[in-house]
Structure formats: structure tokens, C-alpha cells
């Protein structure tokens, strides 16, 4: 009886974990998905047929987004039922988070290892808890991914075609939520070739999501004149953004991001690594720490041009980098087994790392999310193979990682709340019926400033008249300070960051959602308070065209 109730208890436990964040402010790319959903409500057959100001000025949504519209349709349905408040939408999106945890539990049962351990390792990580407290597509993608994978394995095991066809539909839903979902097709193709290469129906099922995604892109091409998938791929390979890392630095920082997202791989190392490996890693880490503290300039941060960061950042980077190496090493070592289940998990984990580090258009911790269930199952399998009791040291290690994950999620929620508070302060003091107020900045700040009546600036067309106000944040992207000769500084107000743990702070090298060259997804530190300038136009002014 308890075995039948355990999956439901797992899902309930996850919902309880997410409840403290139900009122979290909208942040980062949340507004893009919200605008998409609100437009879809009015025009479901033309999802990208509107303009958004997400950089220099308004552009068609199909030229801005890097995602298919699937998440927009889900949010449109949710918003139509429960409304558009933070609490309502976060509550609804606990459902895909719960589905992801339930599917991870089911996959662990089929692929080996204790399912409760595997699920706890997967979901009690910074990347899962932070992603599950946004309205972006990452957690919903994971729900479709894990559910589709479970159905495919169930179909192979039971010889029931209904499970296989359902898996094809779910994989297509994953791909239409976020394009990375289509990566399940080659992953399952390799698995099928190793396990049952003559299952013709299973091969046919894998063609369903490919055909569906192709039809979707042809539909978008007919409406908007180009494929969103191909445009996103072109943007990802252009490498024109100078803030993005390249070469060895990209790999080094990518592994640190992986380790920061999934630190449990390092926390469980004492029960998984041999003594020799542990001594070698500890020795190398000690040398790197000594280099960072003494400033010899021989460590990885210095050699790859990242030595500008202070010692505290370097030390945290080294620990996360070792954790990332542990994640990649676990996957590579599993490939030696040649057993289909082991190869499936290893390629799942490695493929996510390769995409997140080298192929994604920007440096973001959320792209590592699909690796969490694979890592959880692999670690649970290793613990079971070594006959390590869950109530022994590993349980305490996972509990410590859970506390860390909650702390990171709380820091991200605090940052989102601070941005919302700033917008409310601006609306109260600098917005009125006879006052034109412009705002610079995007992400959650734009959403809340516009809700207060602030107009997001169009650098290419907006004209300032004497008396107009301009709100300029101290950090963000697409920020162009005004000409001091045309504006008078009316006020500078600070907003303390608060706390000692941060997810978005360029000053201490942190960029969970958008790295922009920052080496860490989160970090402990005390950055200076964020500041906002309010300018008043003294004369007519138009921003000059950028060359």
C-alpha cells in the first residue's frame, strides 16, 4: 500500500517545497512568455503576430523569441482560468514540476537505483528549484521530457503500442515547449538500437515528433517568412555577442555552471570516488586555492582571462568547477558499461552538458535543468551498486544540498521581489497623469514598470520633451545612459541587495539566468546596493543612432 502511495507523496512533498515561492515576482524572460500568452488568448492562430520592445525598440515577436509557442498556449489557458497574478500562475505551474518529479521517480524504478533517492537528488538542486519558480518553459519542458521517456520505456517493456504512441505525442509536446525537447529523438534512437533494433513500431513512433516539429516550422515559415528554430540556431552559432565566452573559457565556466546547478555530484563524492581519485582531486584543488589566494596568476581563472575576479569568487569558482567535472566524469565513466540503460543515462547527461555549454545561444544555468533527473538516477544507481545505505552519510549530504538549493531559490526570489519593489517606488513617486516617464531596462523590471505606467524607451523613435523623466537602472542589458547635457539628474536611489547569497550580480561574477561572461551561477558575497537614476529632460532630445 505504501509503495503505491509513495509517488503521490513525492509529488506532494515537491509542491510543499515550492509553496514558499508562490508569490515570487516575475523575472528575466517571464514577461516574454506572459505577453505571448496574452496575445494567444486574443489570436490563437497567430502566436507571434505582435511587437515587443526587448532591446533597442519594438520588433516582431517572431524575430525576438528563441522558443516555440507551446508554453504560451499553456500559460494562455492557465491565465484564462486563474488570472495573471504571480500567485495564480506559480501555483498552476507546480503541476509540471510535480509531473517531472513523478516521472523521475518512475524512470528510476525502471532504470535502477532507489527511486526516492534519485528523485530527491534531482529536484533538491538549485537549478530545479529556481527553474520551477519561474513561468518560463524550462520546467514544463522537463515534465514532457521525463514523461515521454517513461512512456517509451513502458511501451518497450510491456509491448503495448499505446504507451509508445503516447510517448511520441509527449516528445512532440516537449519540442513545442522548448526546441531542446527534440533531442529526445536521437537519444532514444541510440537506446532503441542497443536494446531492440528490430522494433519497427518504436522506430515509427520516433518519426512522429520529427514530423510534427517539421510541420510546425513550415507553419511558422508560412506565416512569418522564416523558421523560428533555424533563426535561433543561426543566432546561437553567430557568436557575435562580445559578452559571451569562447573556447576554453566557455568550457571552464560551463563546467562551473554545471557544478553550481548540480552540486550534489561533489557532495556524494566521498561515497563514490576511490581514495586515489579523492587524493588527486584534493591535491589539485589545494594548489589552485593557493594560487588564487597568493595571486601567482597560474590558475584556470587567470590563464583563461578571468583573473579579474576577487579571491572569494575564484575560490567558489574552483569548488563549482570540481563539482562540474564530477558531473561530466560520472557520465563518461557510465559510457564504459555498454549496457543500454547506462548508455541512455550517460548520453542524456552528456548531451545536456554539451548543449548548455557550447550550443545554447546564451550562458544560462536553466539550460542544465534536463540533466538533473539523469544525474539523480545515475547517482542512485552508483550508491545502490556500492551498497551505501541512504540513512548513512549520503542522506546528510543530500540534505545539505537541499538546504543550499532552497537558499539559492530564496535568493533568486528576493532579487525578483526587489525589482518589483523598485517599480512600485517609481510608480508612486515619478508617474502621474500629466507626467511622461520613460524607463530603460528589460526582464522583470520592464514588466513591473509598464504596469506602473512607465513607457519602455524606444531608442530609435522616442523624442524627449522638457520635463520628461527617464528611469535608468544601474545594471541590466540594452542600457544607454542619456546625454548629461540634455538631462539633469533628479535623484539617485539605492536598493540594497540584501542577504549574502545572490543569483544575479555582475559585481561578484554571478549570472544564473544570463551569465554575460560571469563565471558563477550563484555565489556568496556582499555586492554594493543596486542603484537607479532618475533624470529630467532639460530640452528636447533624441537618442543618436548607434553605428
Image (tube, grey):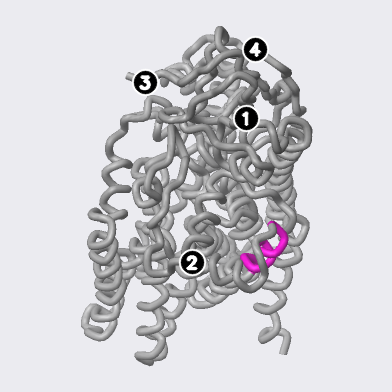
Q: Position of residue 411 (x, y in %)?
A: 71, 41
Query: What stretch of residues is rendered in magenta?
Result: 86-94
Magenta stretch secondary structure, dominant:
helix
The answer to whether residue 88 is magenta is: yes
Pointer 1 with pointer 2, Cβ within 8 A: no
Alpha carbon of mark 1 to alpha carbon of mark 2: how far? 37 Å
The tag on residue 369 is: none
Q: Position of residue 312 (x, y in %)?
A: 65, 22
Alpha carbon of mark 2 to alpha carbon of mark 4: how far? 42 Å
**SS class, disc 1:** strand
User: Can you say whether 441 is above or below 232 in the image?
Assistant: above
Pointer 3 with pointer 1, Cβ within 8 A: no
Label 3 or label 1, whichever comes before in sequence order: 1
User: Can you say whether 499 is above or below 311 in the image?
Assistant: below
- Residue at image point 34% right, 63% down: 182
Label 2 or label 4, whichever comes before in sequence order: 2
- Residue at image point 41% right, 57% down: 334
Q: Which residue is mark 4?
A: 488
Q: Which residue is mark 2?
A: 42
Q: Closer to us: mark 4 or mark 1?
A: 4
Give the camera-side residue of 232 and 253.
232
The tag on residue 505 is: 1
- Residue at image point 67% right, 22% down: 534
Few, some or many residues within 10 Å of mark 3 (<14, 14–19, 20+): few
Alpha carbon of mark 4 to alpha carbon of mark 3: how far? 23 Å
Alpha carbon of mark 3 to alpha carbon of mark 2: how far? 35 Å
Few, some or many residues within 10 Å of mark 2 (<14, 14–19, 20+): few
Pointer 2 with pointer 4, Cβ within 8 A: no
The tag on residue 546 is: 3
Amino acid at each position: 500500500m505504501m509503495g503505491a502511495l509513495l509517488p503521490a507523496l513525492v509529488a506532494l512533498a515537491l509542491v510543499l517545497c515550492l509553496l514558499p515561492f508562490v508569490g515570487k515576482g516575475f523575472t528575466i524572460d517571464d514577461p516574454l512568455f506572459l505577453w505571448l500568452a496574452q496575445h494567444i488568448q486574443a489570436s490563437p492562430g497567430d502566436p507571434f503576430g505582435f511587437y515587443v520592445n526587448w532591446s533597442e525598440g519594438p520588433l516582431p515577436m517572431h524575430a525576438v523569441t528563441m522558443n516555440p509557442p507551446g508554453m504560451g498556449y499553456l500559460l494562455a489557458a492557465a491565465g484564462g482560468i486563474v488570472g495573471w497574478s504571480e500567485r495564480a500562475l506559480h501555483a498552476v505551474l507546480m503541476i509540471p514540476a510535480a509531473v517531472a518529479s513523478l516521472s523521475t521517480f518512475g524512470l528510476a524504478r525502471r532504470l535502477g537505483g532507489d527511486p526516492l533517492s534519485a528523485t530527491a537528488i534531482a529536484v533538491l538542486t538549485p537549478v530545479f528549484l529556481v527553474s520551477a519558480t519561474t513561468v518560463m518553459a524550462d520546467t514544463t519542458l522537463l515534465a514532457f521530457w521525463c514523461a515521454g521517456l517513461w512512456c517509451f520505456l513502458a511501451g518497450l517493456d510491456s509491448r503495448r503500442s499505446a504507451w509508445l504512441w503516447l510517448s511520441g505525442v509527449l516528445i512532440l509536446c516537449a519540442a513545442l515547449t522548448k526546441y531542446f525537447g527534440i533531442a529526445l529523438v536521437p537519444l532514444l534512437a541510440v537506446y532503441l538500437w542497443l536494446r531492440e533494433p528490430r522494433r519497427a513500431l518504436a522506430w515509427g513512433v520516433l518519426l512522429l515528433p520529427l514530423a510534427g516539429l517539421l510541420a510546425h516550422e513550415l507553419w511558422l515559415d508560412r506565416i512569418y517568412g522564416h523558421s523560428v528554430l533555424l533563426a535561433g540556431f543561426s543566432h546561437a552559432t553567430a557568436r557575435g555577442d562580445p559578452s559571451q565566452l569562447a573556447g576554453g573559457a566557455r568550457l571552464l565556466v560551463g563546467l562551473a555552471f554545471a557544478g553550481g546547478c548540480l552540486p550534489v555530484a561533489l557532495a556524494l563524492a566521498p561515497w563514490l570516488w576511490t581514495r586515489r581519485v579523492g587524493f588527486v582531486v584534493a591535491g589539485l584543488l589545494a594548489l589552485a586555492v593557493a594560487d588564487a589566494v597568493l595571486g601567482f596568476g597560474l590558475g584556470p581563472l587567470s590563464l583563461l582571462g578571468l583573473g579579474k575576479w576577487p579571491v572569494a569568487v575564484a575560490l567558489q569558482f574552483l569548488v563549482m568547477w570540481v563539482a562540474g567535472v564530477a558531473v561530466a566524469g560520472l557520465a563518461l565513466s557510465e559510457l564504459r558499461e555498454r549496457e543500454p540503460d547506462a548508455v541512455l543515462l550517460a548520453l542524456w547527461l552528456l548531451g545536456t552538458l554539451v548543449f548548455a555549454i557550447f550550443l545554447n545561444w546564451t550562458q544560462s544555468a536553466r539550460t542544465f535543468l534536463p540533466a538533473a533527473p539523469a544525474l539523480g538516477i545515475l547517482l542512485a544507481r552508483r550508491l545502490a551498486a556500492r551498497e551505501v545505505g541512504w540513512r548513512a552519510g549520503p542522506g546528510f549530504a543530500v540534505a545539505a544540498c537541499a538546504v543550499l538549493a532552497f537558499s539559492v531559490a530564496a535568493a533568486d526570489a528576493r532579487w525578483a521581489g526587489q525589482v518589483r519593489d523598485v517599480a512600485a517606488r517609481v510608480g508612486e513617486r515619478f508617474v502621474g497623469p500629466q507626467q511622461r516617464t520613460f524607463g530603460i531596462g528589460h526582464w522583470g523590471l520592464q514588466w513591473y514598470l509598464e504596469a506602473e505606467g512607465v513607457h519602455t524607451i524606444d531608442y530609435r523613435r522616442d523624442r524627449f520633451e522638457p520635463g520628461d523623466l527617464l528611469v535608468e537602472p544601474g545594471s541590466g542589458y540594452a542600457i544607454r545612459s542619456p546625454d548629461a547635457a540634455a538631462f539633469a539628474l533628479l535623484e539617485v536611489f539605492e536598493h540594497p541587495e540584501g542577504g549574502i547569497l545572490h543569483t544575479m550580480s555582475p559585481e561578484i561574477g554571478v549570472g544564473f539566468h544570463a551569465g554575460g561572461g560571469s563565471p558563477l551561477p550563484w555565489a556568496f558575497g556582499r555586492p554594493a546596493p543596486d542603484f537607479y537614476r532618475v533624470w529630467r529632460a532639460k530640452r528636447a532630445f533624441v537618442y543618436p543612432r548607434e553605428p
